[in-house]
Image (cartoon, grey):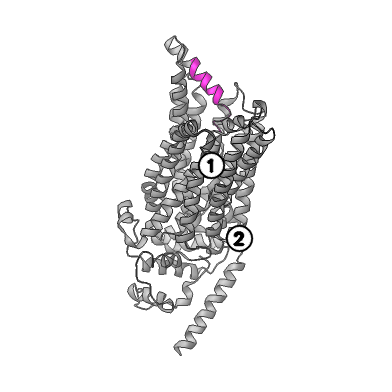
Amino acid sequence: MDQEKDVQDDHKMSNSGKSSGKQRITACLISAAFFGALGSSFLYGYNLSVVNAPAGFIKAFYNKTWVERYREPIPAGTTTLLWSFTVSIFAIGGLLGTFSVSFIIKALGRKGTLLLNNTFAVAAALLLSLGKMSKSFEMLIIGRIIIGVNSGIALSALPMYLGEISPRHIRGFIGQFNSILICLGVFTGQVLGLPELLGQESRWIYLFSFLAFPAVLQLFVLPFLPESPRYLLMERRDEAGAERAFQRFLGKEDVSQELEEVHAEARAQDNLHAASVLQLLRSPAVRWQLITIVITMACYQLCGLNAIWYYTNGILKAAGFAENILPYITLTTGAIETLAAIVSGLVIERIGRKPLLIFGFSSMAVFFSLLTVFLNFQDSVSWMPYLSYICILAVIAAFCSGPGGIPFVLTGELFEQSYRPAAFMIAGTVNWLSNFAVGLLFPIIQEKLQTFAFLVFVVVCTLGSIFLCLFLPETKNKTFMDISQSFAKINKIPIPPSGQEMELVLSVKPDMNGKAPDAAKMESSF
């Protein structure tokens, strides 16, 4: 009888998996992913590129303001320092946002945090837009800090929200909205920065005014979309609210299986309250998940792509391109990035997270190596600069094929509900510190190593690929409990026999009647 019941349960699980694979993607889910990312990751991407086009105009504004204020020209070193500070302070703001996000999420939830975050974007847009009129370069610097705070909060709250509202069979696809909108933001900043549009001395302030538009649009749409049902059920104990959220995201009335799976995950956790960073660091059960995320997120920034974004014009000038066509060449890099991110989102559920990450980092190592060779021979061969340009495009495409978005997806997948906010806080801290380090150190590295500077990134990408190949399990189409179990061996945590995993969990954390629900019901599309 027991064997017959096991066969029946397996059959039910199989049918459940098949039905979930055919489950349609609802307009509610797509709207939450798109508008959530529009007011969050889009602004992050936009701010990575928007300062390139008006750089000369902003420096001239600094000089003019200095002369009017102090009756003497600004020293050359001071101009460089102020400009570098304006660019790099964005990362410091991001770090501040990351430090605060776990507290905001605990109080307001995932959706509430995204809504509150729009106030930072609007405030930054006002400061950056009115700085010139007020003759205050300090307003620009403060505005860059505040929009950095916005990005720091967004890059933690948004992936958390997307991961928790998505059925597991499309969790990677929905999570890639974060990456796609980052790339689209970069591309939009490049387009609006063209001389024919806002890249003029009389119009550059409107590049920063544009920051308010996506934020206001999100403020109008997101309140009508549901909160994360996992957050509502596991942290707010609002089962009715969670049921309604599941129904809207999935487009069906019967969501009992989804609710049962979340209940099972809740029973399997020792602590349903959000764990602190210190608790996360001390827990042996998630040690290798944490190591994996720290290394992956560090490689995400230290792989060298930000060096290309921050210093695209300088790299292309060194490659021999005329200055008057640089904005249009830069535009093609943003287009390639966006296209590669879209393709990655479309194939991630078929190929998987691990292969895309390893392919991306490995390809970047190859193309950075070729770029180094081409840059060393560009003065001796007339057509060599074009090969350098092709390598730049290839590096960007390789990055967006996996490393550009999957680290954020993984951070949400590798940790159970109680650890997730602290995990995003640690991942975000690594992200922004690495971002700041690249922006600060790459000019020094480039000055010392010249055309061999990109070999540093070859080493980072190679080591990252090796680590991921050895230690990262595939998370495609797995529940959060399945993913936690896949790390149990390396964490030296006992693994229950596969046929008794759910029964053991439920015997440890029984329901109100002291009975364990049918294990087959635990499997669902989430």
Magenta-span inclusion, residue 51: yes
Between residues 319 and 194, which one lies in front from this camera angle? Answer: 319
Q: Which element type, helix, strand or loop, lies under badge 1? A: helix
Query: In this figure, which residue is indicated by the disc labeled 1?
Result: 305
x and y, in percent, of residue 142 in the image: 43, 29
Between residues 423 and 376, which one lies in front from this camera angle? Answer: 376
Q: Which element type, helix, strand or loop, lies under badge 2? A: loop
Residue at horizontal 57 percent and vertical 57 percent from the top: 173
Label 1 crowding class (10 Å Cα cut-off): few <14, some 14-19, many 20+? many
- Name the N-terminal-most of marks 1 and 2: 2
x and y, in percent, of residue 371 in the image: 59, 40
Residue at the extreme top: 71
Residue at the extreme front: 380
x and y, in percent, of residue 297 in the image: 45, 49
Dot 2 amino acid type? Ile
Q: Is residue 380 above or below residue 499?
A: above
Q: Is residue 471 above or below residue 138?
A: below
Query: In this figure, which residue is indicated by the disc labeled 2?
Result: 25
Residue 108 seen anywhere in this rendered image of the structure: no
x and y, in percent, of residue 243 in the image: 48, 64
Do residues under tags 1 and 2 come within 8 Å of each other at their CB atoms? no
The magenta stretch is 50-64
Dot 1 amino acid type? Leu
Residue 180 seen anywhere in this rendered image of the structure: yes
Q: Of circles 1 and 2, which is in front? A: 1
Q: Is residue 197 above or below residue 44?
A: above
Q: Using the numbered discs, state the Cα–Cα distance from disc 1 to disc 2 in whole angstroms.
A: 33 Å
